[in-house]
Image (tube, rainbow, N blue to C red):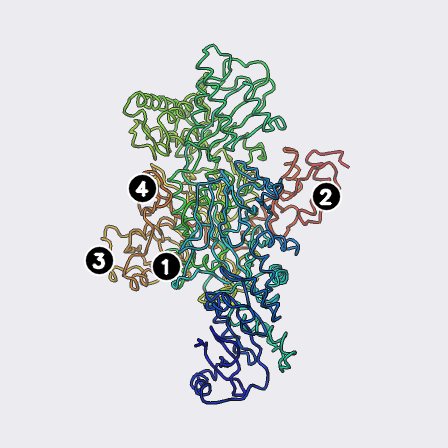
Amino acid sequence: MSETGGEGWGQSGNPTSVFAYEGHQGPEEGGMKNEGEMQKGEEEGQGKEEDEDYDSPPERQIVVGICSMMKKSKSKPMTQIMERLCKFEYITVVIFPEEVILNEPVDKWPLCDCLVSFHSKGFPLDKAVEYANLRNPLLINDLNMQYYIQDRREVYRILQEEGIDLPRYAVLTRDPDRPEECNLVEGEDHVEVNGEVFPKPFVEKPVCAEDHNVYIYYPTSAGGGSQRLFRKIGSRSSVYSPESCVRKTGSYIYEEFMPTDGTDVKVYTVGPDYAHAEARKSPALDGKVERDSEGKEIRYPVMLTAMEKLVARKVCLAFKQTVCGFDLLRANGHSFVCDVNGFSFVKNSMKYYDDCAKVLGNMVMRELAPQFHIPWSIPMEAEDIPIVPTTSGTMMELRCVIAIIRHGDRTPKQKMKMEVRHPLFFELFEKYGGYKSGKLKLKKPKQLQEVLDIARLLLAELGQHTDCEIEEKKGKLEQLKTVLEMYGHFSGINRKVQLTYLPNGQPKASSEEEEGPKEGPSLLLVLKWGGELTPAGRVQAEELGRAFRCMYPGGQGDYAGFPGCGLLRLHSTYRHDLKIYASDEGRVQMTAAAFAKGLLALEGELTPILVQMVKSANMNGMLDSDSESLTDCQQRVKARLHEIMQKDQDFTEADYQKLAPTGSPSLVNSMKIIGNPVRTCDQVYALIQRLTSQIRKRLEDPKSADLQLYHSETLELMLQRWSKLERDFRNKSGRYDISKIPDIYDCVKYDTQHNATLGLEDTLELFRLSRALADIVIPQEYGINKPEKMDIAQAYCLPLMKKIQLDLQRTHEDEAVNKLHPLYSRGVMSPGRHVRTRLYFTSESHVHSLLSIFRYGGLLDEVKDQQWKQAMDYLSAVSELNYMTQIVIMLYEDNNKDPGSEERFHVELHFSPGVKSCEDEENVPLGFGFRPASAEVCGVSVLEDLSQDEPDRALPLSELISIRRSPMIRNRKTGSMEVLDQGHVSYCVPCPKLRSLCSGLFSASVLGVSSSAPNLRDYVRTHHRKPPLSPGLPFGDAVKRFSVSFARHPTNGFEGCSMVPSIYPLETLHNSLSLKQVDEFLNALPRSTVSAVIVKWKRLEATTSQPRVGRPHKLTERNPLLLKCLKPSSVAPLTTEFQTASGSNVSTITVRRELHEMGFYGLA
């Protein structure tokens, strides 16, 4: 007995189609037709079938046969599409039973005019080809090409022949008959396949397309190991493995890894002119499959660019697969095909089902209707009109969030110099090409291992021969060996060795060197270690990322009512254009990865997140500090700073004018604490001596000799870093090296926070004094007066400022963005809307410089703008830009304003000085809150009566959050939850963890004012439970000036329960800037482009290519780092290159004049 999909009637009143699942040979049974007569067909069909001999239809039916495994034939997409196909009046669908396909000869298979057949596991493709040759039906998908689709080598060959972009790849074939095709050389951080080198990260794919065990190998600089992808099992699609070596059996394709920001795009064609695309979270990111309430993998339809549509057409035609799925990687502004899957349907999209049936039905009718003399013509339909989302009321849409963030808590940075002369060091220098430039940097594990081997060998020789002529001192070799042996392995991101060739040896320059220089050439070995992100730093970054979600408008559906729900919904529905950039320092990159993990609620290790989500900006200097490219201004400033700090007398009024001409309260307070700088340095030096003495005594005590300190440090290593500071801080003449003050403060801050259990005496006094010194030295190294601050700041971060300008200007969407398709999106109210987020992670130098530009670059006039005056007073009171310092820029759009109006776009500037320090409780500067003029006075608090909804969870009166009221007028912004009266406001918050989360990011001045905060009253009434938050949030109560929480990381296995200081909440510096104001401010920053480029060439004999930053402005307003490797040997080529790179129409006369002004004469 056949199982039918339903029976219906055509316009002639006769049954016209079949939808059978088994045991069916032709169109004897009725099938489903137009919906208006379906019910009638169901009621009358059986009676007609049993009792009446009805006439055959006047026109012959076209039979479409479905020949596949039953699991595929009965799948929901196939059922939905075939039901719709049956609604074509002249089409009948017949599904071949699986037992017939597997067990019967092909001449016994059902007859059909059109065959839909495709390979899957267990399907006899050979028999299907034999059937097609026997019956010669119209093939929807070519069968012979399906053999090629099963071999990734053939797939890539066909793609290459068609001119379709694909990742760079090489094939490793392990075949005894073809040994020449198996040439694999594996290195520490790369593989070489048949002469083609693939640095990590790279992808390793089995050549058999049915094998889904694809591995991605990560570089040691990112933590090493590999991500192992497999066919989905439950909620997992990949798992991280520490194994870094490639597989040694089987044949594979090795290909370049493409950074896609954690998103894959799957494209589904139905003929060459139709393509549907869906985006999903990349399985390589954290391996967790995102599923909806029905257990289906969450995917969202996205728009294809014109070029991608052409690629879809090419794939469809090249593989002769009408219905075809393939994978697209969007990376670096291009789209690459990385896999072709053959026959594949979209799941859970009614619109796609309609479209697919329509396209297939029209295709079948177009090909077969003429030969069967069926009267039919293709219906003409109007082209779909894209939906344009609009906003209602006066709501301002968040369009862009830009954040510049300093890295998290790190270990103290340390450095050791020694002059070496042993032949083994010279051999190593020559082996890695050191003589080419005279300098060599060794960071790779293999290289560091060679240095360690030399150190061990020399120490062994020293032990055997006390009168050995080896030049290296035993103490420094011991330190070299100890540092390189730390952690038991080389990660490549926390230690490096630099060698510099000294043709005449090194003259005595510091207390570290020997009494007299030796004759002949030598090498200066500089060992750098430390400075790596601590477990506390990871927690800080991850939890700040989690709290950062609250910056975004609230979500709907599954996300409604949860803190940070808006960001997660935006990102999951591919309306969030997120890019994360980091400098090339390991601590900065790991901070960015941990932040991304918290921001996007990812799971697992940081390595896959780092490789896929974080872009390194080291190629253009945007986030990295290049000391060679700086002006001489900073050197002059440092010299002047040293001169002032070497005076053995109390600071005079003239010193205050010299050292703090801006009148910064934080500087003035520090100078008052110090009094006499030399006497204070004497005190610091004495305290360091006392500290090293205490550590030595601990080492002599057998009970504490093997004591393990924070982050695997030993007492011996702790002693070494303090002893080194003791040696270096004061030279033999008694003068102090002021440049060591930041290092001293760095070390004592680290030990005060992480090693307080040692109970060392006087550490707090050392912290207090060294901090006072550091509060002068560190910020003033970036300029003492305003012109110096601006000069140094521009040298550091002008490329970053111009990139920020580009981010703000580009409110329209890039084609490369994953744009949600409006016609296929369900439950998304504004599918065309995007929020652009750009996160820049960098070091202290860039944060100082960027803040200097905003403060001293003339953005606003303090005299005319009271809010800016208050913001500048607040910044002047901030003494330290600590770890996780944030500068946040938010761009809003008011769609009700005229597009050309200055009021259309609204910019806000926010700031947080980062992590709270040990002594901040009493002296914290008070800001004016987060978005302090963003809500007008209203009558009733949204949160005020939450205790009535949940009396058992209300906090006692003593724990109510007291809110300072800003004296400014407040204008309501959509979604505000603030309540103000003439006094000040109290909120009763039912969940301490929620309060901690929100207050960690936003100032307590106006907690809840953010339009992004969820409606907690609705949440509590609906759910009657606390919102789910992760344990161990490091953000304390914002009212307390210092709080410490104990955080244990849930997945990464952070050792112990480290104290993690909370982070200062964001304070609004200004909230009523126009985009035009900001744009004009950024335009006014750069000096003449030609002039600046020539300056850099004069210093470095080369310039670095920088990304274009939007539409070109006048020459005097262009970015000085845009040109590409200009060397002014001749004016004409220089002018041409400049015009090409900048888009500016500059004459040779202008260039020549600039060259003359900079001292270049006689150029042709």
* Element marked by disc 4: strand
Q: Earlier in the sequence, mark 4 or mark 1?
A: 1
| Of labels 2 and 1, the one closer to you | 1
Q: Earlier in the sequence, mark 2 or mark 3?
A: 3
> Where residue 727 sits in the image (x, y, percent)?
43, 21
Q: Nearer the viewer, residue 369 or 1060?
A: 369
- Residue linked to disc 4: 1044
Residue sitting farthest toward the top? 467
Q: Earlier in the sequence, mark 4 or mark 3?
A: 3
- Residue linked to disc 2: 1135
Q: Earlier in the sequence, mark 3 or mark 1?
A: 3
Q: Residue at x 61, y 45 (%)?
A: 1119
| Of labels 2 and 3, the one closer to you | 3
| Of labels 4 and 2, the one closer to you | 4
> Where residue 363 sits in the image (x, y, percent)?
60, 72
Q: Give how far apart the Cα atoms at labels 4 and 2 are.
A: 59 Å
